[in-house]
Image (cartoon, grey):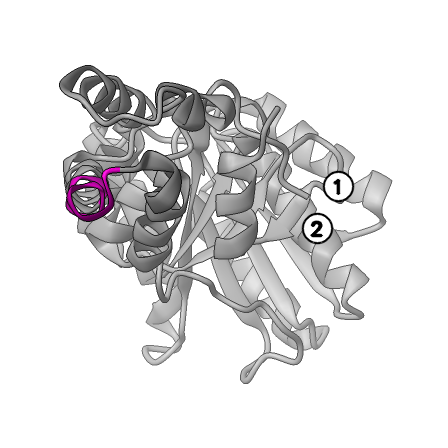
Amino acid sequence: MLGAFKTFANSVNAIFKSNQLDEASIEELEALLYTSDFGTEVVELIIQEIKERYSKSKSIEAIHPESIAREVIAEKLKGSEAPFKLPFQDKPKIVILIGVNGAGKTTTAAKLAHKVKELGGSVLLSACDTFRAAANEQIKSWAESLNIEIISSHHGADSAAVAYDSLLAAKNRNHDLLIIDTAGRLHTKKNLMHELEKLNRVLKKQEPNLELDHWLVIDGSIGSNSIDQAKAFHSVVPLNGLIVTKLDGTSRGGSLVGIYDALKIPIYFVGTGEKPEDLHSFSIHQYIDALFKNS
């Protein structure tokens, strides 16, 4: 499911080949953990626990540093797994995918739609990235190849109007899930962030109690910058889901721990490739195994 993360996998145990704990090995481990974007608190917890256990046993083999790191990371991710199961309590469930350009949002929308079909559900895609003509064509191509219904409009159309038309269609056609693919936006661009707020207002105008899920799609390879992105988006719309993409080829997967630790946003899926089936439910156990798997 998840492949081994590059470079990190073999490095932890290699640091302690001498079976001794000294300042050089501690500094090397700290550098490795920071490079992997685990964040200060996680790094300090791992180092502290290793030091305390070593002071009692005086043997690296006895304390097994990799196991300590696994324990700390697992504890930090406790509660992060988010089951995605049909049937949903209310139909249609509405998931609005947001994120920056290049995070893999449109591809993720198609993968999520494919996942719902595999589970026996019905799904409607809403092409609300009306800023880029290429994005509209991309999601329509995905919908055609996967035989998924889609609501779209022309380049430059009002994305909020497209979203509202999609909601009406999803209700009339009794779909289980409506996936709204929004335009990629930098969290620093106020006009685009305001457009996202407008989309939410329009959807709730006729139904004030309508439940909207806002899932952030984030590139797992950008490291600690992803934490700043998540915080910025969370300040505009209440995020209640996370999908982390591109985890198959990065040494910086530790940022996933930092995002969850900072915001406690449940992690629904991780993306590990470009194929429709390369979207997997997040599992703490599988994530940690991939992190420490020898490559």
> Would residue 25 appear left or right of 274 to someone viewing this image?
left
How far from the left and from the top, in percent, is residue 263?
23, 54
Q: Is residue 72 visible?
A: yes
Count residues near mark 2 (Cα–Cα under 10 Å), then give few for <14, some for 14-19, many for 20+.
Answer: many
Query: For this view, does 80 lie left or right of residue 88?
Result: left
Choose the circle earlier in sequence order: 2 or 1: 2
Q: Quadrant of the C terminus?
A: top right
Residue type for callout 2: Ile
Q: Measured from the top left, where is residue 191 in percent x and y? A: 24, 33
The percent position of residue 171, horizontal first and vertical second, equals 62, 75
Tell me what residue is drawn at x 67 percent, y 36 percent.
Answer: 139
Membership of 75 in magenta stretch: no
Q: Dot 2: what SS?
A: strand
Q: Residue at x 20, y 49 (%)?
A: 262
- In which quadrant of the rendered image does the N terminus lie? top right
Q: Residue at x 46, y 54 (%)?
A: 96
Location of mark 1 (residue): 276
- Pointer 2 residue: 150
Looking at the image, the residue that sits furthest to the bottom is 89
Location of residue 205 with respect to 21 vertically, above or below: below
Q: Is residue 194 visible?
A: no
Residue at disc 1, secondary structure: loop
Of tags 2 and 1, the one toward the viewer is 1
Q: Determine the image quadrant of residue 169.
A: bottom right
Question: Considering only vertical position in the picture, is 102 above or below 276?
Answer: above
Residue 129 to residue 172: above or below: above
Closest to the observer, 52 or 194: 52
The magenta segment is: 50-58
Q: Amino acid at mark 1?
A: Pro
> Is residue 52 found inside the magenta-colored segment of the image?
yes
